[in-house]
Each structure stands twice: as C-alpha cells, then as structure tokens.
Amino acid sequence: MTDFKPPIATRTTKELLKIVGAVEKWNSEAVEQARIELKLRNVSQDQIRHAEYLSKKADKFEDLKKAKESYSVGDFIFEPFQTIFEVLVSWELKKDGFLKKAEQQKRLRIIFGLLILIVIIFIKLT
C-alpha cells in the first residue's frame, strides 16, 4: 500500500471527489483509497458521478481552449526566441491539441524560410 502525501484519508471530501472524478490523472491506488474513504464518509454515488461529469467537462473545456490558442504579436515581442524556436522546431503542436497554432506554424515556417533565403541572397550579393 502506497503512502501518499498528504494521506488520502486526511484530504477533504472535495479533494477526494476530484481524485475519483479524474481517474486518468491519478495513480490507481490513490483512486481506490479515495473511493474507500468516500464510502466511509457516506458520500453518495450521485456525488461521485457528478464529480466525474465535472472532470470530463473541465477536460473538454481545456481541450477546446488549447485548440483555439494561437500565436499573437505579443508572443514575438515579449518571448521572441521561445516563439520562433517553437515555430521552427516543434513538430508536436497538432498532436498536443494546439490546432490553430499548428495551422499558423505552417504559414510562419514558409515566411521564415523566405526571410532566411532573402537574407542569404542579400549576403551573397554584397
């Protein structure tokens, strides 16, 4: 039996409901201990199902939020190196759920490629 910090039994009912509501985010033993503790506290199955529903709804919201996230001018002004590196090197944006960023990345790579080509030609001509 795994000891968790803080111990599962000392957590609030709200925290326990979050654990059983998001089983994919937690160790299976933690989920089982949380279920046992909720049963000891006489928490109804309806409350547990509601916690599962809320967790799924929150996950869907996060996925939607990620899918709509995009690059902005501020990204290139305040974090230029990180943003340019992500645009040029990252291959996982679409896989990670950043759908809009992945579409922008395609266009930005073409633009950066053309800019690099223009700089190289300009350097060769001078």
Image (cartoon, rainbow, N blue to C red):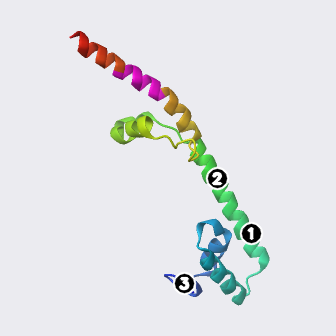
Give the side of residue 117 with respect to residue 1, left or right.
Answer: left
Q: Amino acid at mark 1?
A: His
Q: CA distance from mark 1 to mark 2?
A: 16 Å
Rendered view: 116 above or below 90: above
**Percent coordinates x, y for residue 42 in the rendering:** 74, 87
The kind of secondary structure element at disc 2 is helix
Among the 4 quarters of the image, the one containing residue 50: bottom right
Look at mark 1 in the image and give the residue it sits on: 50
Q: Secondary structure at mark 1?
A: helix
Residue at 24% of width from left, 16% of height from top? 123
Q: Is residue 25 above or below residue 101?
A: below
Q: Is residue 116 left or right of residue 51?
A: left
Region of the chain picked out in magenta, as a range: 108-116
In the rendered image, residue 9 lying in the magenta stretch gets the answer: no
Viewer-proximal residue among 123 and 76: 123
The amino acid type found where label 2 is placed reads Phe
Residue 62 lies, with reference to residue 104, above or below; the image says below
CA–CA distance in space, label 1 to label 3: 27 Å
Q: Quadrant of residue 11?
A: bottom right
Mark 1 / mark 3, whichever is N-terminal: 3
Q: Are marks 3 and 2 in contact (CB under 8 Å)?
A: no
| Residue 45 placement (x, y as % from top left) | 78, 77
Mark 2 lies on residue:
61
Where residue 9 sits: x, y (%)?
59, 87
Residue lying furthest bottom in this view? 40
The residue tagged with tag 3: helix, strand or loop?
A: loop
Q: Nearer the viewer, residue 78 or 117?
A: 117
Residue where numbered disc 3 is placed? 2
- Taking depth in this image into account, of 28 and 63 the one nearest to the observer is 28
Picture coordinates of residue 77 (x, y %)?
Answer: 35, 36
